Amino acid sequence: MDLALFDFDGTITDRETMPDFMSAAVRPRRLAVGKVLFLPLIVGYKLGLVPGSLVRSAICRFGFRGVPVEEVESQGARFAEAFLPGTLRPEALERIAWHKARGDKVVVVSGGLDVYLRHWAQAHGLELICSSLEQRNGRFTGRYQGSQCVRAEKARLVRERYSPSEFSRIYAYGDTPEDHELLAMANEAYYRWQPMVPARLGGR
């Protein structure tokens, strides 16, 4: 059996979906204030001056602090069913189907949130490793539960759940520098759907 590891945003989808989820799930008044408050941070991110992990952490804390878990979970289920299907790349779905037909273990490894990714992964019969938000007394604190599932944390969480030595071959698919460590785990890696030269992977 082989192991296939897929990043989600920009790899399986044609865009970053977390901003769309925030627009759908954050309460309107908070959303309006947040768009103004975090504009400099977002511009910095787009210019490559601010790390995405910092932007996501700040926005989640502002958007979800004190909000009932049930409210956000409900939004996540609707988002997965109504919005995500329109963002999926045909080549990604074809490759996932190819791995499943071979009997490979297919895992989505994403920095996105489990409140919506969990529903999508279950609907497609895929395993999931991703970021999650901290809960307390039925409400979100706005903080992440542990570290965000990006960069080295992606590879660490994969190794924590699966033993690479149990698989004949590892495939990995990603599209940003946040996927580098995940891609480096693979025997066969694809960056933005183009094969990576083995010498660039760093090996297992």
Image (cartoon, rainbow, N blue to C red):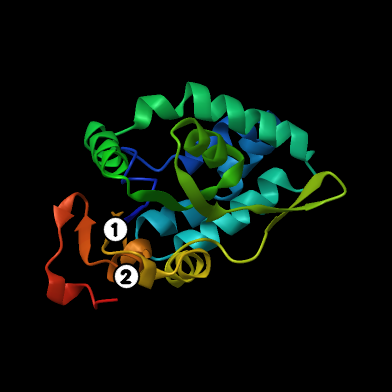
Q: Residue 108, relative to residue 33: is it above or below?
A: below
Q: Is residue 15 left or right of residue 53?
A: left
**Rendered location of residue 109, percent (x, y):** 44, 54
Q: Tag on residue 172?
A: 1
Q: Residue 115, relative to residue 78: is it above or below?
A: below
Q: Quarter of the image holding residue 27?
A: top right
Q: Residue at x 43, y 59 (%)?
A: 44
Residue 40 appearing in the image: no
Q: Is residue 192 left or right of residue 110?
A: left
Q: In the image shown, does 29 or 122 lie closer to the viewer?
A: 122
**Rendered location of residue 19, percent (x, y):** 49, 41
What residue did someone put label 2 on? 185
Q: Earlier in the sequence, mark 1 or mark 2?
A: 1
Mark 1: secondary structure: strand
Quadrant containing the C terminus in the rendered view? bottom left
Q: In the image shown, does 171 or 133 lie closer to the viewer?
A: 171
Q: Residue at x 14, y 71 (%)?
A: 198
Q: Amino acid at mark 2?
A: Met
Mark 2 Cα-neighbour bin, 10 Å: few <14, some 14–19, many ≥20: many
Q: Residue 35, relative to residue 58: is it above or below?
A: above
Q: Tag on residue 189?
A: none
Q: Quarter of the image holding residue 12?
A: top left
Give the Cα separation between the discs numbered 1 and 2: 8 Å
Q: Amino acid at mark 1?
A: Ala
Residue 197 appearing in the image: yes
Mark 1 Cα-neighbour bin, 10 Å: few <14, some 14–19, many ≥20: many
The answer to whether marks 1 and 2 mark residues whose Cβ atoms lie closer than 8 Å is: yes
- In this view, the residue farthest toward the right is 137
Q: Quarter of the image holding residue 126?
A: top left
Q: Residue at x 49, y 30 (%)?
A: 123
**Rendered location of residue 38, percent (x, y):** 56, 50
Mark 2: secondary structure: loop
